[in-house]
Amino acid sequence: MQERTDRIVETDIPARLDSLRWSPFHTRVVTALGITWILDGLEVTLAGALSGALKDSPTLQFSNLDIGIAGSAYLVGAVLGALGFGWLTDRIGRKKLFFATLTLYLVATAATALSWDLASFALFRFFTGAGIGGEYTAINSTIQELVPARYRGWTDLTINGSFWIGAALGAGGSIVLLDPQVIDPEWGWRLAFLTGAILGLVVFVMRLWIPESPRWLMVHGRPEEAARIVAGIERKAVRDPDEPAGGVWPVIQLRMRSHTPLREVVRTLFTDYRKRSLVGLALMTAQAFFYNAIFFTYALVLSTFFNIPADQIGWYLLPFAASNFLGPLLLGRLFDTVGRRAMIAFTYGISGILLAVTGYLFAAGVLTAQTQMIAWMVIFFFASPAASAAYLTVSETFPLEVRALAIAVFYCVGTAIGGVAGPALFGALIDSGSRDSVFVGYCFGAALMVAAALIGWRFGIAAERRPLESVASPLAAVESR
């Protein structure tokens, strides 16, 4: 349908979407779209759990530094993919992009299984990351715009936490596929990467019926199409008892537009909403370094300092993944009740403090592989909802027209600063064989988390249970009442 712009329309679509109770429609949406994080968890865990097999592979023969380089290549791809696809998501729509990004992921992760040297492996990991990075922007914005306000915090955190379901799948798969009694490890690691492509094909089919975001449509000159989609959703859902008498909803007036100029995006992010940008950047950077530096090299720590065989790494990743999923699941409700600022400050702060304490015990040599695993489980029970809250904060505190690109920009900058360098840095620190050197890296990650906690508390937005349009009015808004 041709977009019709430069006219003003009055719509009650945001209020109607936010008034709904949870329904099977919402369950299907978060399942079909939220599985992105399962795919990412699978990819990241495979890269870590398979590191020993990649080092022992007669074809690849990677060093610890090579493993770190490959991890960084994945993250560089995610950064560039998020930025490019994020820009396109705000211009041509959410639905077109989440099919394009999934297709790129499918092709690239299948190609990884055919790698023959470091260059090919890193290249395919780069494009796999690009697909996943693009998914982050399209999917986060779509879910935020379809989920009712009262469920938004818990839903977003739980979906992001489902990364660890993928991590558990990757860990469990590595246990089987790296067992020489089951399959030759040289074929095992290749088959492991193919599992991601197979899962992606299933997701592709599930997404065929997901509608375009009505909020995006109403701004981009297609209010009639948006109204039809919302009417279809309403037929399958139940309204909240607080529904206005007589079905009279608050309305907002919008001036239709085909796109948002880049200069307006820059002004919005870095002038009009600069304090929110500071919060988003701080949260994204801290969690990116914290997670990527530690998790990408977790298997190397176990094998280098605790002499855990490569085919046993998965057993240590499974409980670690469980605690990371349980954190958002059990603490997520508090982000909607206690509030965003308090919970962000708490989860970021306690994660940083616990990391510093555990790092000291690691450097002192008092931890075994088992107690190290338990320590990580406790730390990441809090760090997982903290990391998820970074995506929640960025995706709900900026106007609709720049939402996807805002997610992309802060994911890119945060990951570039905190994530890309992290795996390579820790790979080098671990290669040194010095526990003290690794401890210094842990202290840096802890300091970033504590600093982010303070920034989140001071400048964060109390967005809990509020409609997106009241947290950040659309740039196209003319008047709301």
Image (cartoon, helix red, strand yellow):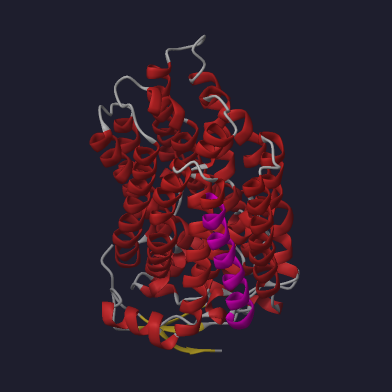
Which quarter of the rendering shows the C terminus?
bottom right
Which quarter of the rendering shows the N terminus?
bottom left
Q: Position of residue 240 (x, y in %)?
A: 71, 66
Task: Tell me: 290 left or right of 218.
Answer: right
Q: In the rendered picture of this protein, how many numbered marks are placed on residues?
A: 0
Q: Nearer the viewer, residue 426 or 226?
A: 426
Q: Position of residue 460 (x, y in %)?
A: 59, 78
Q: Residue at x 38, y 66 (%)?
A: 413
Residue 451 counted in the magenta span? yes
Q: Residue furthest top?
A: 181
Residue 354 counted in the magenta span? no
Q: Which residues are magenta?
A: 438-459
Q: Position of residue 389 (x, y in %)?
A: 59, 63
Q: Nearer the viewer, residue 180 or 83?
A: 180
Task: Tell me: 464 left or right of 120.
Answer: right
Give the dominant element type of the magenta stretch: helix, strand or loop: helix
Q: Residue 456 falls in which quadrant of the image? A: bottom right
Q: Residue at x 29, y 35 (%)?
A: 121
Task: Tell me: 447 left or right of 217.
Answer: right
Measured along the vertical axis of the image, is residue 152 above or below residue 204?
Answer: below
- Asked if residue 337 shows in the view, the reply is yes
Measured along the vertical axis of the image, is residue 173 above or below residue 129?
Answer: above
Q: Position of residue 273 (x, y in %)?
A: 45, 84
Q: Residue 445 falls in which quadrant of the image? A: bottom right
Q: Residue at x 69, y 41 (%)?
A: 367
Measured along the vertical axis of the image, is residue 128 above or below residue 280?
Answer: above
Measured along the vertical axis of the image, is residue 430 above or below residue 274?
Answer: above
- Asked if residue 99 shows in the view, the reply is no
